[in-house]
Image: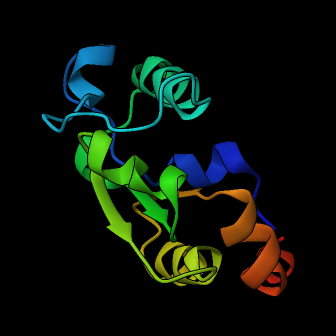
Amino acid sequence: MPDTNELLQLVPKAEGAQSMKDFKSDQEVRWCPGCGDYAVLAAVQGFMPELGLARENITFVSGIGCSSRFPYYMNTYGMHSIHGRAPSIATGLATSRRDLSVWVVTGDGDALSIGGNHLIHAL
């Protein structure tokens, strides 16, 4: 099985330097005050430029719940899927499109409750 660095070689690189601002969408971020999702979003938007990947080849897949609004706040492609099925959808997408960097964003109920078996399968 190829390692992660080998697979990332298949994802097109960005043409120029990117910044955190390049990964912020024009959508107003709406989570409850003090929610940890703000920190996760800022961290991901902060390290994405370091990967040097073309934004049009990055996809975030989410399920249901507050954390699953994440794809709307990223200036990349994304999909808000059905409850607990984000790992399954992301696995299919990543398998069929090796030129994409596919990420799953999920919360505790989405991933560990209804989606528990899908998460185990993806692992």
Residue at the spot 51% in from the left edge and 46% down from the top edge: 9
Between 54 and 102, the one lying in front of the other is 102
Q: Percent position (x, y) of residue 88? A: 62, 83
Between 48 and 26, the one lying in front of the other is 26
Name the quadrant containing residue 31.
Answer: top left
Residue 10 sits above or below residue 112 on the image = above
Which quarter of the rendering shows the C terminus? bottom right
Residue at the spot 25% in from the left edge and 28% down from the top edge: 24
Q: How is the image coloured?
A: rainbow
Which quarter of the rendering shows the N terminus? bottom right
Q: Classify residue 107 as left or right of residue 66.
A: right
Looking at the rendered structure, the number of numbered marks drawn on it comes to: 0
Residue at the spot 74% in from the left edge and 84% down from the top edge: 114
* Residue farthest front in this picture: 33
Residue at the spot 81% in from the left edge and 70% down from the top edge: 112
Residue 11 sits above or below residue 37 on the image = below
Q: Percent position (x, y) of residue 105? A: 56, 55
Q: Percent position (x, y) of residue 21? A: 24, 17
Between 72 and 76, the one lying in front of the other is 72
* Residue farthest left in this picture: 26
Name the quadrant containing residue 39.
Answer: top right
Q: Classify residue 111 as left or right of residue 76.
A: right
Residue 37 shows up from this direction: yes
Residue 18 shows up from this direction: no
Q: Percent position (x, y) of residue 70? A: 42, 48
Residue 95 sits above or below residue 35 on the image = below
Residue 80 sits above or below residue 81 on the image = above
